[in-house]
Amino acid sequence: MSLEPVYGPHPSRCLGVSLGVDPISFSTSCYMACAMCSVLNPIRSLLKYHAGELVRSVERDLQERGLEIDTIYVYGSSDPFLYDELTELVKGLREVSEQQGSRLVVRTLGYFQRALEAVVESVDELHIPFYIADMDWNTLYRPSINVTRSEYLEKLRELFNNTRKSTEKLILEVVVARQGAENIFTDYLNDYFMLIRRLKVRKVLLKTIDRPVRQSNLKPVSRQSLERLKEMFENEGSWVQTCLKPSTLPRIRVKRAFIEVYNHVLRKPLKTNEVNEIYGEIGIIAAESLVGRKLLSKQIWENQLFYLPSK
């Protein structure tokens, strides 16, 4: 089955209707194996796309499939800042997003920061995820490089300090989940919040997980926990948006159902009703066929049936 760098559109809770661009899934693996990552299996291929090819792929996808999107989202199977041509890519996508009247968002774990200023200049928003769960930092982030929690947090502080002139573009994306009882999670929440305070962030997107993630026993937290955390941020003077309800997607023109569904699920597991809403009945047929070919599998998570990549 063909691996492709453009996936979606996805009904995001924070970004509206987003079209994903995964620039480095074909050459470089991520330096973290985060427990809350939605990419359940590593995605690797011998192919590598140049920035111009990626931009043309996005333009072609938008035109041929009749997509109306809110956001072009640069992220997928790894950190885009590992991609050698990221500056050229975001400059090209900037033109596409302006033509579409959409936002351009890049998501990064923040450890590698080459060409940071050039990227920030071209994007509408730079999202930096920060995970909170009832587990220690090493278990939560699982770095494959030699970095400690203190060193990683220092890199994040450096990122925020180096972009103070563009603070409106920097958003800390706080994602919370739990593996145990809610009261145990609360103790960890307080500890992680003290770490976040040192970053002095001004804008926060706040959400819990809404689909299976890499560590299978993680579950969503309650609305009450999100509200409590929101209040904690607001007391520090931060602007906070809680992301709760996914966007409604208009029906799209499906050109290659098998490839489109497969590449979407590789980056984000999809509920059966999401596949139907995005890709229609042909999408369900494609997903079931991919399950039969053992390229995808099905799993019940939080009382909902999801398609996810086969292991």
Image (cartoon, rainbow, N blue to C red):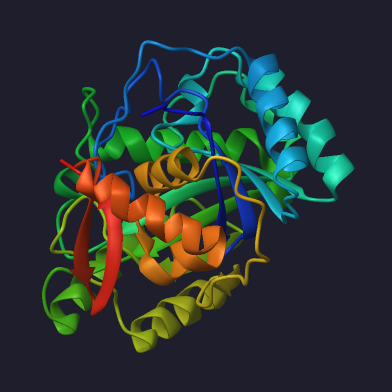
Q: Where, by quadrant of the figure, is residue 161 drawn?
A: top right
Q: Which residue is drawn at 70% across and 25% down?
A: 55
Residue positioned most to the right: 99
The residue nearer to you, when weighing 159 against 259, is 259
Question: Does residue 65 appear in the picture of this structure?
Answer: yes
Give me the residue at 44% from left, 47% from top.
Answer: 261
Asked whether the viewer can see residue 165, the reply is no
Quadrant that contains the N terminus: top left
Above or below, comparing residue 281 to residue 26 in the picture: below
> Residue 222 placed where, x, y %?
32, 84
163 displayed left or right of 281:
right
The x and y percentages for residue 53 are 66, 17
Q: Is residue 31 left or right of residue 123?
A: left
Please state the total of marks drawn on the protein image. Answer: 0
* Position in image of residue 300 (x %, y %): 20, 70
Q: Is residue 19 left or right of residue 235?
A: right
Q: Which of 299 and 259 is in front in this view?
A: 259
Q: Which residue is at the far bottom?
A: 224
Quarter of the figure that contains the C terminus = top left
The spot of residue 38 in percent (x, y) is: 34, 50
